[in-house]
Structure formats: structure tokens, C-alpha cells
Image (cartoon, rainbow, N blue to C red):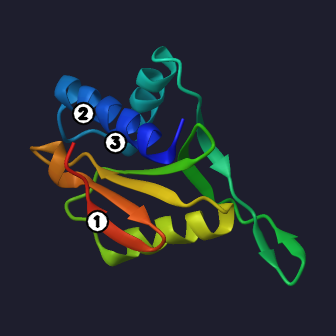
Amino acid sequence: MSENEVSKHVVEAALAVHRELGPGLLESVYEHCIALELRKAGIRCEQQVALPVMYKEERLEFGFRMDLVVEDVVVVEVKATEAVHEVHFAQLLTYLKLSGKRLGLLINFNEVLLKRGVRRVVNGLPEEVRP
């Protein structure tokens, strides 16, 4: 499955979760529900994936964790915040760089319309997703 196909499935799962639960819950709730939706659809999804930092050939364990890694090609960062800020994009970009992945989705569930809260990050360039 291509990165774009995987991201489409992630967005569909996020929309289903948002329709069912709405905004206002904890990020962990949305993360678990997206993972459940994806797994029910037969899509491989890992949660809280450890991400070490390599510095001058030293592996440093700092407890960085990617919320979701889907089909080993898309990193998903789940938020439930008033507003998405540049630091949230920077966090996802760092995860992409450290993991060697190319595509990330930043999903903020604290929106009345979820499509306003979904952003793709590809090669360091955020862009809005229109499901």
C-alpha cells in the first residue's frame, strides 16, 4: 500500500472516530480509537513507537514516542488542543527525520469539523488535507 493510500485510510478512521466521539477528549482516547478502526480494517498500526536519537553514532534513549506508525510508512501525531502551533509541526518533522519516514499526519481532534484539523507533512512541507 502506498503512503497516500495509507494516509487516506488514517483520515477515514479519524473521521469515523470524530463522528462517534466529537471533540473534547484526551489525545490518548483518540489514538486508541484510530488504532482500533485501522486494525479492524486489516491495516497494521503500532502505537507509542519508541524513537531513539542517534548522535555521533551513539544511540540515545530519551523516551520519544510516535503516537501511531501505520503500515510502517505513515507517522501520525494525534493532538486534542485549542490550536496547532509550529512546534507541533516541528515535533512531527523531527519524528519523520529520526524515523526515516517520508509522510506524516498531524490530526487535531479539538475541531468541530475534523477536516480543519488534519494536516499532512511531506518532506517538511505542511499542507492541509481535504478528505
- Quick one: 98 or 52, which is closer to the camera? 98
Of the two numbered discs 1 and 3 on the same chain, state the one appearing first in sequence: 3
Q: Which residue is mark 1?
A: 127
Crowd band around label 2 with a 10 angstrom C-alpha radius: few (<14), some (14–19), many (20+): many
- Where 131 falls versus 56 (above or below)? above
Q: Nearer the viewer, mark 1 or mark 3?
A: 1
Judge whether residue 65 can be spotted in this image: yes
Q: Which residue is mark 2?
A: 15
Question: Which residue is rendered at x = 39% and y = 37% of the image?
Answer: 10
Q: Which mark is residue 26?
A: 3
User: Are dots 3 and 2 in contact, CB under 8 Å?
Assistant: no
Residue 54 image position (x, y, % from top left): 80, 73
Question: Which residue is rendered at x = 27% and y = 38% of the image?
Answer: 25
Amino acid tagged 2: Leu
Question: Which residue is rendered at x = 89% and y = 75% of the image?
Answer: 58
Residue 108 image position (x, y, % from top left): 28, 52
> In the image, 102: left or right of 18?
right
